[in-house]
Image (cartoon, rainbow, N blue to C red):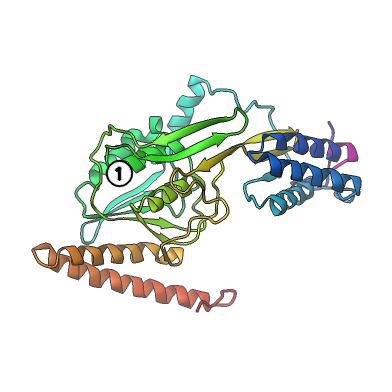
Amino acid sequence: MTSNYSDATDFVLEETQRSAVLDAVVATLNQYVFPEVAEQLQADIQQRRADQGYADITGGEQLANVLTLQLQELSGDRQLKVHFSAQPLPDLKPEAAPTPEALAAEKYQSGLRNFDINRVERLRGNVGYLELYGFEPPDFAGEAIAAAMIFVAHTQALIIDVRHNRGGSPAMVALLCSYLLPAYPPTHLNDLYWRPNDSTRQWWTVPYLNAPRYLQKPVYLLTSQETFSAAEEFAYNLQVLKRAIIVGEHTAGGANPGQGYRLQEHFWMFVPTGQSINPVTQDNWAQTGIIPDVKVPAELTLSTAHLMALNRLLETEPTGPHFRELQRSMLMVERELNTRRADLISQLKQPGGSEVS
């Protein structure tokens, strides 16, 4: 297939190329987890084709953007996306299992990021802090997460930060939830239904861990608009089970896992092929995102949760040697929060910012 490039990032589509992409999108929608919605989307694309609704689209990037907008508006699913690549895409089979060499290389790269465990700290007042940029598979990150949980084991409250976490392995979600919940009876966390093979995978807490469980102590979870996919499942699980207080911003709403499909040499499409189903609510967070228990801007979440944790500890320990340390810590964190809040308000008042009430 030849393409006429109009600039470095796009090319001019011929009618046959555009038609091939539309055919591929219609066919790929057969993998979409919601078949009734898929039929509506397919019918809408075919109707627009009949009405010459795509005739004036001549650029690859333009076609990808138009299709993405069309699919998301009709389905309400922000995960359905068509992507354009100026460089030819390899013809990979997504269902193919990775080779041992590929897995070893992936684990090595994950290790260079410390398995997305970005920070583990003991904050003022003996409050633990764990910041995760992703959920790497337990085969990669199991030992590292155990080491992190050993480090915070003797803290009196724990803050887990997934503000910049875009998701990852559901098995790691189940493993980390297991550290925060009793071993017995096991807790049913989530179900994942997969349309392509009409199967359901259940996720439960695991009975044996390589570090102590963090039980009967308060847990706070920080979220932002960046929090997505598996990180949202982690938050949803703990919120439904009343095991954590969610502090931060409304999350993106990526509840349905899927995979990428190559449509054509320069186009690929992400299609949700699975559905998360919480065993308690029989629902998920796709339409709503995670609604925090305490809504604050992302910039203020850590100080806010830290202050909440210290308040809680002061209530439960009104006397004793730790009381004065808690009081001092609370004053310092309160001062930090007020400073951050003033800085944020100042930034919002700058040209280009928007004042908040």
User: At x 33% / y 62%, what residue is drawn?
Assistant: 305
Confirm whether the magenta stretch covers residue 15. yes
User: At x 40% / y 38%, what residue is drawn?
Assistant: 172
**Relative vertical location of residue 193 with respect to residue 280 in this rendering, above or below:** above
Mark yes or no: residue 111 visible: no
**Is 134 in front, or is 308?**
308
Report x, y in % for residue 308. 30, 65
Compared across the picture, whether 132 is left or right of 326 comes to right
Q: Amino acid at mark 1?
A: Leu
- Residue on which the image places disc 1: 181
Q: Within the image, what quadrant is residue 262 found in?
A: top right
User: At x 41% / y 43%, what residue is drawn?
Assistant: 116
Which stretch did the figure color magenta? Answer: 13-17
User: At x 54% / y 35%, what residue is drawn?
Assistant: 193
Report x, y in % for residue 260. 64, 36
Report x, y in % for residue 61. 76, 48
For the image, the number of numbered tags is 1
Report x, y in % for residue 236. 44, 50
Mark yes or no: residue 330 visible: yes
**Relative vertical location of residue 198 with respect to residue 311 in this rendering, above or below:** above
Quadrant of the rendering where the N terminus is positioned: top right
Confirm whether the magenta stretch covers residue 154. no
Which residue reaches farthest left? 320
**Is 28 in front, or is 239?**
239
Please name the predominant secondary structure of the magenta segment in the image: helix
Which residue reaches farthest top? 100
